[in-house]
Amino acid sequence: QRCLQKDPKQRLRDIGDARIALDEVLSGAPEPSATPATPIPVPMWRRVLPWAVAAAFAIAFAGLAFIHFSQTPPPVPAEPVRFDIPMPPKTSFVFASGFNISPNGRELAFAATGPDGTNSVWIRDMGSSEARPLAGTESGADLPFFWTTDSKYLVFQQSGVLKKLDVSSGVVHTLCDVSPAALGGSSNRDGVIIFGQGDGGLMRIAANGGSPSPLTTLDSSRGEFQHVLPSFLPDGRHFLYLRVSSDLAKSGIYVGSLDVAPGKQDSKRLLATTLAAEYVPSSADPNKGQLLFLTSDGTLMAQPFDARRFEFTGDPVPLEQRVGHYINGGEFSVSIDGILVYRAAGASTESQPKWFDRQGKIVGTLGNSDVYYFPALSPDGTRIVVGRGAAEYQALWLFDSSQGTNTRFTFGSADVANPIWSPDGKRIIFSSNPSGTWDLYQKLASGAASEDLLLKSNENKWPSDVSHDGRFLLYYALNSQTQTDIWVLPLQGDRKPFLFLRTPFDELNAHFSPDGHWVAYESYESGRDEIYVRPFDPESSAADASGAGAKWQVSYGGGALPLWSADGKALYYLTSDAKVMEVGVTTSPTFQAGTPKFLFQAPPLAHIPALRATGRYTIDDKRFLFISPTGQGSQAQDQAPFNVVLNWQDMLKQQQ
């Protein structure tokens, strides 16, 4: 009541007086009247003391409050947020080209085959549910593409030309010719673009185009045959890249520099791996972030990395399990602010050999889901040799349709690749690298003996076909100056190999016609892979391998992996977007080719331009055997969504 008096003279002046009054009531003093005539007298000392105590308490509390609130409380780690981004309806993801989130994290670009069967780069705003194909990228989704650092352009390869597309305006700019095809790249803020090659070192070019110049050179003493998938570090002068060697134990991630001559780049390996890695800066210090990389079992690891000193500063921590990879690229992408996008391993790596009829209908399946490569059908059509194993090129296996069995054919730790049959079906010839270089070996198809060395040299080489009379073996070999060349190894006499074709361009995957007078092969001489046919005569072929003389172009608009029909009246090949084509041919009195005819769309794993080997297929004229992703039909598995993870860096802080 006293606190509510209107007359200031009758109203208590502070909380100290009120407390004293309340104490008096509680101690038994008379209760004040509702409207006292005069205020209760309070001694001066009792008035001053509460004020002094209150003031001292207020000062002390203010000091404590200042200390408390001036300190930043420890942040509460954010929980990871996970969600999926589905593929657009009626589209198929193109594994060979992959996907990339923009550096600013706002847009996801990915390669897909649209409802009309056209391969394009598609783009989706991360804040939208709609995706759209980018005009100008049609048939340009064959190879890995990448964003410029400002997130304004996509750089991609199309028909032997490196281009960049302004995502907002749709304008396409030509940068330069590329041969062989570009394999991944990166750009910096100073207008420098770097990219890998199918067979060679890294190249650099100005962001507005021009003539590319070498950035790195292959180290032949280490068996290197590719430098690919570079990515700039925060300073814009140094970059990470993958060196691929025929000896997989020497492959790994290295640090390069724009300021170092091509032949003098640092040879110290940062990380032993056969897959590319990606650096993600931290928000506190761009030079102290995480290096993301995949293990052989598909575990995505994050390891603290100092991008200024180029060294790890902590132990790796598992981030995600069963992340996919394709050839040398991991199926993950990270924006600068740490938005992680990846695809699960089962969506791309698990596969099965499947038979397709001429209309593209699946008419048979071999074995169980696994990872398969290089199928080859025996001459009698009853057995198939195929690479199999979660580790690339781990071993060859034999499937016997007559007995319904499948058995392992090669053993040991060396890699194996490109198996082919002898015409009598008694031997299998293949490449292996126990000494670090890919050499040619053969083994009895019965498995009754160990493999024998057929040809050893300083160049990496892979077999492609044996003539029907068993006299000659075609193989292609890697040369640091002329890319891949086609050679002939006589299987009788002194077995001295001779060149069939050597030009400045790639030539590979050569096959004899059934009569042995013609060789079909693929070449990059036009700026993209096309199919050509040349006559074969052991005498003239050995004398002139320069590319001069008669030849006929069979494909137009791109072609790879040619195969002859059993009667020699047709050639089959694949286009860059994995369409199976058939061309009628006559070989007497001279060679003539008809108009290519489309048969059906091959499964997504059928053609991989980056390697042009794992996509091999085999035929018996009525059926085509392809390595196809596991799933119902050839396209259903390509609908697997993109997995998105936010706040994964906070999760790492709790583990490190």
Image (spheres, rainbow, N blue to C red):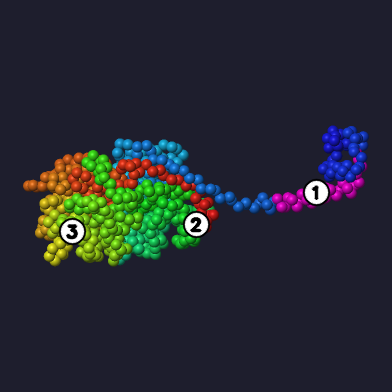
Q: Secondary structure at mark 3?
A: loop
Query: Looking at numbered disc 2 in the image, what kind of residue is underneath it?
Result: Lys
Residue 55 drawn in magenta: yes
Could you tell me if residue 46 is visible in this image?
yes
Please tell me in which quadrant of the rendered image residue 542 appears.
bottom left
Q: Secondary structure at mark 1?
A: helix
At 45% across and 45% down in the image, what residue appears?
Answer: 644
Which residue is label 3 attached to? 426
At 21% across and 48% down in the image, what residue appears?
Answer: 619
Query: What is the span of residues highlighted in magenta in the rendered image?
Result: 39-65
Q: Earlier in the sequence, mark 1 or mark 2?
A: 1
Which residue is label 1 attached to? 54
Q: Earlier in the sequence, mark 3 or mark 1?
A: 1
In this view of the protein, which residue sits in the foreground, 240 or 112? 112
Spatial separation of the CA atoms under disc 3 and disc 2: 58 Å
Is the C-beta separation of discs 1 and 2 under 8 Å? no
Which residue is label 2 attached to? 288
